[in-house]
Image (cartoon, rainbow, N blue to C red):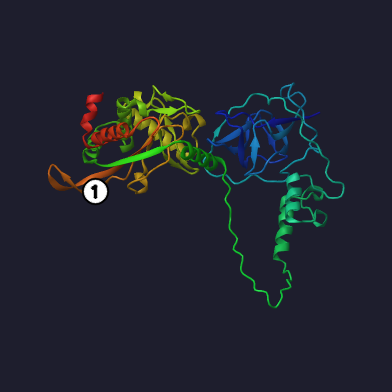
């Protein structure tokens, strides 16, 4: 005789306490295999697929797209054969009595490329059995979400015809009842002297997932870090010429970003106080021996900052390969939480958006960020003559607690000199 196993949201690492349901990959009543992905969730770090360690028939799903699920809270229950699965796994109540938040829902449409899978233990950690509540005797509805929706919309469930098995009332039935009520004309008595004004509805987009995490981090950075910014225009003509020379030889192509990353690692070796962060209580400064270089990248989830580990120990070609790999992962949504954390310095190439300058907010708890604007042909005085040169604006934002303007200005001037005369890098290698 089958027993029902409860699978809870596993610990996804990086100190995350929960995740938002993006889409369900299985339906109630569907037969699943061991380790089959059942749900796609979004954390503050990445979008991942979560596989279930049990094989059998899905009897319940907990949470709907957009809902936050806490680590350790139930995700699904699965009816498995009595001999299947770990014998010490928790047993949930029979499926007919378990409240099923999404009974009857289909699988949401895929949002594109497949996401990475997160490993889970062979058995879920023991948790208390879910709350069991019998369905009302008169109204055929099981889902507490359906009951809540009806309550919020003022729908009398006793007057709703259910479209589910045995007349079970589904969410779609309640939504149809709401739509029918809205469509019906409602007589309104208006006094002759009353003047009515149109009411403009404003939509509110909730902050969730990555957007919420970014908002919280930037707010904290703006609140806690006394940041200052300095900038300078630099003639990048020689740097672009060097890139063309490098790419004319066999081997992987070298990007402008890779050259700028190499310049940053050399500059940080010269000004190590900028590869640091202030302690959480503000009582000290942590100097980092390794340069873990973050860089801004656009993804379908918005702006993310992947991190090149040990950037100081990589050659220009190796930096280019890792930057390209992480950029591709950002585009297809497969970055791992570890690839998005632990940076010590950020390189922000906002020139790709066609803009010249910016005063960015620091990536807390980092103490500095180099910004690079577009490289564009401009009139420039070169060797005493007016000429058309490839010019860019460099901006440098820093935590004023870790250094004064002299250090920040020295760093930025060194970077600008390397951009204008890239041969200077040979002295540092």
| Residue 153 percent location from the top left of the image | 73, 55
Residue 157 found in image quarter: bottom right
Q: Return the x and y of residue 56 as percentages of the image width and height.
A: 71, 32
Residue at the far left in the pictured view: 384
At x 39%, y 25%, the residue is: 310
Pointer 1: residues within 10 angstroms few (<14), some, or many (20+)?
some
Q: Residue 307 lies in what quarter of the image? A: top left
In the image shown, does 316 or 152 lie closer to the viewer? 152
Q: Position of residue 373 (x, y in %)?
A: 32, 44
Q: Name the side, left or right, on which 331 lies relative to 236.
A: right
Residue 140 visible at all: yes
60 left or right of 389 in image = right
- Which SS class for mark 1? strand
Looking at the image, which is closer to me, 46 or 80?
A: 46
Q: Identify residue for label 1.
A: 377
Q: Residue furthest bottom?
A: 192
Q: Position of residue 36 (x, y in %)?
A: 63, 32
Query: In the rendered image, which quarter contains the N terminus?
Result: top right
Residue beneath the point at 24% across and 32% down? 249
Figure check: 388 above or below 277: below
Image height check: is 183 above or below 312?
below
Q: How many marks?
A: 1
Which residue is at a point 22% across and 37% down the rendered structure image?
A: 420
Q: Residue at x 50, y 38 (%)?
A: 220
The image quadrant where one finds the C terminus is: top left
**Can residue 253 be seen at all in this image of the molecule?**
no
**Left or right: residue 58 compared with residue 420:** right
Q: Residue furthest right?
A: 137
């Amino acid at each position: 005789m089958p027993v029902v196993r409860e699978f809870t949201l596993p610990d996804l690492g990086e100190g995350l306490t929960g995740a938002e349901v993006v889409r369900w990959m299985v339906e109630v009543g569907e037969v699943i295999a061991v380790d089959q992905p059942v749900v796609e969730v979004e954390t503050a770090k990445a979008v991942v697929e979560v596989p279930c360690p049990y094989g059998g028939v899905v009897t319940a799903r907990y949470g709907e797209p957009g809902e936050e699920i806490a680590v350790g809270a139930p995700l699904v229950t699965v009816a498995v054969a009595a001999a299947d699965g770990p014998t010490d796994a928790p047993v949930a109540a029979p499926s007919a009595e378990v409240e099923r938040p999404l009974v009857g829902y289909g699988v949401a449409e895929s949002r594109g490329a497949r996401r990475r899978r997160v490993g889970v233990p062979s058995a879920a950690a023991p948790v208390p059995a879910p709350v069991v509540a019998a369905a009302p005797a008169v109204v055929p509805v099981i889902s507490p979400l359906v009951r809540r929706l009806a309550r919020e919309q003022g729908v009398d469930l006793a007057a709703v015809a259910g479209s589910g098995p045995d007349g079970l009332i589904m969410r779609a039935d309640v939504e149809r009842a709401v739509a029918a009520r809205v469509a019906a004309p409602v007589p309104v008595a208006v006094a002759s002297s009353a003047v009515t004004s149109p009411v403009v509805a404003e939509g509110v987009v909730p902050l969730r997932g990555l957007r919420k995490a970014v908002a919280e981090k930037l707010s904290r950075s703006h609140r806690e870090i006394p940041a200052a910014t300095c900038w300078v225009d630099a003639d990048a003509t020689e740097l672009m010429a060097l890139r063309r020379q490098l790419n004319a030889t066999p081997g992987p192509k070298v990007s402008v970003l890779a050259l700028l990353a190499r310049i940053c690692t050399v500059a940080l070796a010269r000004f190590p106080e900028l590869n640091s962060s202030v302690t959480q209580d503000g009582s000290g400064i942590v100097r980092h021996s390794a340069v873990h270089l973050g860089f801004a990248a656009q993804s379908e989830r918005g702006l993310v900052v992947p991190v090149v580990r040990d950037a100081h120990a990589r050659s220009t070609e190796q930096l280019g390969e890792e930057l390209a790999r992480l950029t591709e992962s950002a585009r297809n949504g497969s970055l791992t939480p570890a690839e998005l954390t632990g940076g010590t310095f950020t390189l922000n190439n906002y020139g790709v958006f066609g803009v010249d300058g910016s005063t960015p907010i620091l990536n807390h708890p980092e103490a500095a960020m180099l910004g690079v604007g577009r490289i564009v042909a401009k009139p420039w005085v070169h060797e005493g003559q007016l000429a058309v040169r490839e010019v860019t604006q460099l901006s440098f934002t820093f935590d004023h607690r870790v250094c004064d303007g002299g250090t920040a200005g020295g760093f930025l001037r060194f970077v600008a000199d390397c951009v204008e005369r890239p041969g200077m890098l040979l002295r540092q290698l």
